[in-house]
Amino acid sequence: MATEEVIRAACDLLPDPGRSVTSIAGLLGVSPGTLCNHIPDLKELCAGTVPRQLEAPTT
């Protein structure tokens, strides 16, 4: 179960390029799917699409 504290902690850790959703989930004791279900940007990522703010800039 993802509490508000777990979701907040995950959101704080997500910008770290050295951490994956899976590693963050393991650290916090939840499944990657749980994080995907509770964090809007991850819903898109887990569904196979990349959130707009995470896309590489086009030149």
Image (cartoon, rainbow, N blue to C red):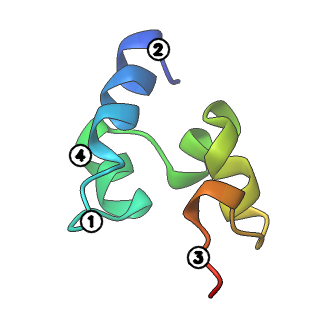
* Image spot of residue 54 (x, y percent): 56, 63
Q: Nearer the viewer, mark 1 or mark 3?
A: 3
Within 10 Å of disc 1 (Cα), the crowding (few <14, some 14-19, many 20+) is few
Identify the disc placed on residue 27: 4
Question: Is mark 1 in CB contact (under 8 Å) with mark 2?
Answer: no
Instruction: Out of 21 and 52, give the one closest to the viewer.
Output: 52
Secondary element at tag 1: loop
x, y percent for residue 50: 69, 68
Cα distance, mark 1 to mark 2? 24 Å
Upstream in the sequence, badge 1 or badge 4?
Answer: 1
Mark in front: 3 vs 2 = 3
**Number of numbered tags placed on the structure image:** 4
SS class, disc 2: loop
> Where is mark 3, residue-wise?
57
- Label 3's element? loop
The amino acid marked with disc number 2 is Thr
Q: Earlier in the sequence, mark 2 or mark 4?
A: 2
Picture residue at 35% right of the left edge, 65% below the top: 20
Q: CA distance from mark 3 to mark 4?
A: 31 Å
Q: Which of the two discs, 3 and 4, labels the residue nearer the N terminus?
A: 4
The residue to which callout 2 is attached is 3
What is the residue that sits farthest to the top in this orientation? 4
Q: Compute the Cα span from label 1 to label 4.
A: 15 Å
Label 3 vs label 4, nearer the camera: 3
Disc 1 to disc 4: CB gap under 8 Å: no
Residue 26 lies, with reference to residue 7, above or below; the image says below
Q: Residue most toward the front?
A: 59
Alpha carbons under labels 3 and 2: distance apart: 34 Å
Q: Is residue 18 left or right of residue 24?
A: left
